[in-house]
Image: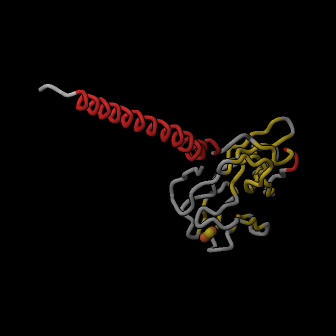
Amino acid sequence: MILTPCAMAEQSTDERRAFLMVITAGLGAITAALAIIPGLGFLASPLRRAGGGAGGNPLRVAGERDVKPGKPLRVTAVGARDDAWLRLEKVTLGSAWLVRAVEDGPIKAFSTVCPHLGCGVDFDEKTGKFNCPCHTSAFDLDGRCLGGPSPRGLDELETHVEGRDVLIRYQRFRVGTAKREPLG
Ligand code: FES
């Protein structure tokens, strides 16, 4: 087929138009990707950090001499916590009972959170047991469950004595399950 000069000019215009459309679409896709990728990274950042907070750094909670035999000492763990996109310093993470069964014996730490439904566990000096006021679960000085609906004993926390200081690694656990499952 022989094309007239006008037909040739029209074909050339159509090719240019198609070429420009392809270029425009490509630039649009690249621009959209550049806008979305950093946003996805921003949204995902708390998810990436979620696993890092579990049982963070050991925290000083008491002096070693403050823990008397047979007299559990309630302490508060204060430390840093990653909350969504923020790092919060000096936050109360939770409480623990420090227990020394015998004179100069090792010190153990138990979370004060009842493994049944999460109420705070108290210590009864008269009976020498830990009691949960919500549904009457009871625990001995070693954290073992003595009665009530709690599905497991008290949750023990990692404890170190460094010099004169008692340090614990505070950790939360899932409540209502027989298996001890760390959270966060
Ligand atoms: S929450 Fe402690 S016994 Fe139910």
Q: Position of residue 105 (x, y in %)?
A: 77, 44
Tell whether 144 sits left or right of 169.
left
In the rendered structure, the answer to whether residue 160 lies left or right of residue 2 reads: right
Q: Position of residue 150 (x, y in %)?
A: 57, 65
Give the colouring mode of the picture. secondary structure
The image shows a total of numbered marks equal to: 0
Q: Residue furthest front?
A: 5
Above-or-below relation of 113 to 14: below
- Viewer-side residue, 49 vs 21: 21
The structure residue drawn at horizontal position 70% and vertical position 48%, both measured from the top left corner, is 86
Q: Is residue 108 above or below residue 34?
A: below
| Residue pictured at 30% horizontal, 35% vertical | 14
Residue 92, image quadrant: bottom right
Measuring 56% from the left and 40% from the top, which residue is drawn there? 38
Q: Nearer the viewer, residue 58 or 146?
A: 58
Q: Position of residue 72 (x, y in %)?
A: 78, 57
The N terminus - image quarter: top left
Quadrant for residue 52, please give it. top right
Front residue of 20/98: it is 20
The answer to which image quadrant residue 18 occupies is: top left
Q: Residue at x 60, y 46 (%)?
A: 46
The quadrant of the picture showing ligand 1 is: bottom right
Going by the picture, which residue comes out furthest to the left?
A: 1
Q: Position of residue 131 (x, y in %)?
A: 69, 68
